Structure formats: structure tokens, C-alpha cells
């Protein structure tokens, strides 16, 4: 693949702009400044640098964002900045989208990708991909309420009971809830159905993936689909 095409495929601008980046010495591969935009490279497994920043070549990008509060999981946010504003320009140009949504006031693990098939696999109800949340509660929760979450609660938009796959009380007012669904405000509504209220919510797991140690709110990292 030509260098200008490689940069273009990774979201670094138009082909003309990517050619200019090479000519101006902004691209380094294996310690060598590459100034020929038409030089051919094998993209698979390639790591290149643009202005000193390392980028792995990805046919489809998948990143994990540690979402802070005050951001919307929307391409067209209404009241708060989009989570996409926390990503660098090339990833925004590539058209990454959130895999599911977290509310503006919910923190934690958010996946973003430009792989539509992967989004479908991870969010389709039949896949039952587990998601783990830590909910800070307004009132202490008793054992009866915890068991009710496991047995199933009825939400006002569906007569069928919704069950949690896991419900663990870390503290009387801190609940770890594992869900395989993705309904609107599901954690908050399930907790409300047992007579309590969520004061703060954090997603700590998606599939097998957790937030890497040291990844602060607002920061992101690359991951692989196999990690999920």
C-alpha cells in the first residue's frame, strides 16, 4: 500500500494532505523518515509514527475510552460535548461510533469502533454480552431486594421480567450488577423497581474487557476484538 493511501485509510486527511505530510518529513517508519508518498508498505502489523506519535495500522479501529461524566454518547450531542471530542482527529475522521451508550452522568468503560459488523455482534440481544456496572445507591439494599434483581423485575415498558445475571453487594450502598441487555436506563430502572435509587453509576466491564490500570477518565487505548 502506498504511504499516502496508508495515511488516508487511517484518517490523517485527504490523499493530498497525506502526501504532503510525507513530503514534509512528518512520517517515520522503523526509525526512518519516509518522504516519498508513493513508497509501498505492507500494512498488516505496521506501526508508523506521525509527528512522533506512534500509530498501529488497523483495517478496523477499536478503542476503549474511560468515559468521564459530562459527555454524551452521540454523534450529534444536544446538551454536553460528545465523547468523540475526547479522541484524536484521525479517529474522528474515521467515523468511530460508540458501541451502545452510557448516560451523560455515567462513567466507565466505553468501546468505540468503525466496524459496523462488530457493533452489531456486541449489541445484539441474542449475543448476551455481559456488562458490569457499579451502582452507588441512595439507600442501603437488603438481601430481599438483591434476590429480586436476580429473579427479575418488571419495567414499565415491558411486562416480561428483566433479570440481572449477577448482583453483588460490595457495601450496603454499593451494588455490582451484571447485565446482558441494553435497555434505556436499565440499571437505574431496575434499581428503582426494587425501591431504591442510583446516585452514581460506573461501568467497569464489557465482555472480558476491563479498564486497564492507569487509564484515567478521559483517556483511551487500543484494544483487539479478541480481548472482549
Image: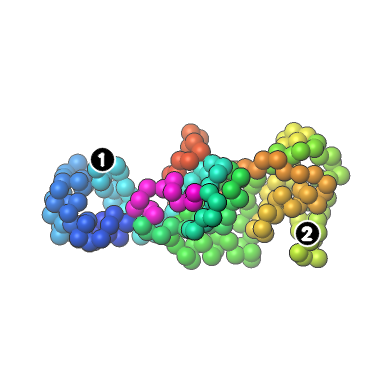
Q: Nearer the viewer, residue 86 or 131?
A: 86
Q: What secondary structure is found at the residue carrying circle 1? A: loop
Location of residue 12 (image quadrant): bottom left
Location of residue 37 (image quadrant): bottom left
Q: Position of residue 100 (x, y in %)?
A: 57, 57
What residue do we see at 67% from left, 59% from top? 183
Q: Could you tell whether 153 is left or right of 183 in the image? A: right
Q: Which residues are magenta?
A: 81-92
Is there CB contact under 8 Å for labels 2 and 1?
A: no
Q: Check residue 43 in the rendering and tell me which mark sits there, or answer none.
A: none
Most common secondary structure along the magenta stretch: helix
Q: Which residue extends farthest right?
A: 144
Q: Position of residue 84 (x, y in %)?
A: 45, 51
Q: Nearer the viewer, residue 101 or 1?
A: 101
Q: Residues within 10 Å of mark 1 (few under 14, many from 20)?
A: few
What residue do we see at 61% from left, 50% from top? 103
Q: Position of residue 178 (x, y in %)?
A: 68, 49
Q: Check residue 52 in the rendering and tell me which mark sits there, or answer none.
A: 1
Location of residue 124 (image quadrant): bottom right
Q: Which residue matches tag 2?
A: 155
Q: Is residue 144 magenta?
A: no
What residue do we see at 25% from left, 40% from top? 52
Q: Could you tell whether 118 is left or right of 154 in the image? A: left
Q: Could you tell whether 92 is left or right of 143 in the image? A: left
Q: Which residue extends farthest front?
A: 79
Amino acid at each position: 500500500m502506498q504511504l499516502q493511501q496508508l495515511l488516508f485509510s487511517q484518517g490523517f486527511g485527504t490523499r493530498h494532505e497525506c502526501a504532503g505530510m510525507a513530503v514534509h518529513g512528518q512520517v517515520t517508519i522503523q526509525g526512518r523518515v519516509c518522504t516519498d508518498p508513493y513508497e509501498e508498505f505492507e500494512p498488516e502489523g505496521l506501526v508508523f509514527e506521525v509527528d512522533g506519535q506512534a500509530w498501529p495500522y488497523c483495517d478496523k479501529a477499536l478503542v476503549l475510552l474511560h468515559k468521564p461524566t459530562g459527555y454524551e454518547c452521540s454523534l450529534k450531542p444536544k446538551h454536553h460535548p460528545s465523547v468523540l471530542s475526547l479522541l484524536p482527529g484521525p479517529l474522528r475522521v474515521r467515523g468511530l461510533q460508540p458501541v451502545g451508550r452510557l448516560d451523560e452522568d455515567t462513567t466507565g468503560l466505553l468501546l468505540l469502533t468503525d466496524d459496523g459488523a462488530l457493533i452489531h455482534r456486541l449489541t445484539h440481544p441474542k449475543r448476551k454480552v455481559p456488562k458490569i456496572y457499579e451502582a452507588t445507591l441512595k439507600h442501603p439494599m437488603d438481601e430481599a431486594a438483591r434476590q429480586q434483581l436476580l429473579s427479575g423485575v418488571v419495567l414499565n415498558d415491558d411486562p416480561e421480567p428483566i433479570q440481572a445475571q449477577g448482583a453483588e453487594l460490595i457495601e450496603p450502598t454499593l451494588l455490582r450488577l451484571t447485565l446482558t441487555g441494553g435497555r434505556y436506563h436499565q440499571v437505574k430502572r431496575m434499581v428503582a423497581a426494587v425501591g431504591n435509587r442510583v446516585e452514581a453509576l460506573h461501568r467497569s466491564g464489557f465482555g472480558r474487557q476491563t479498564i486497564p490500570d492507569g487509564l484515567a477518565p478521559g483517556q483511551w487505548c487500543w484494544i483487539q476484538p479478541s480481548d472482549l
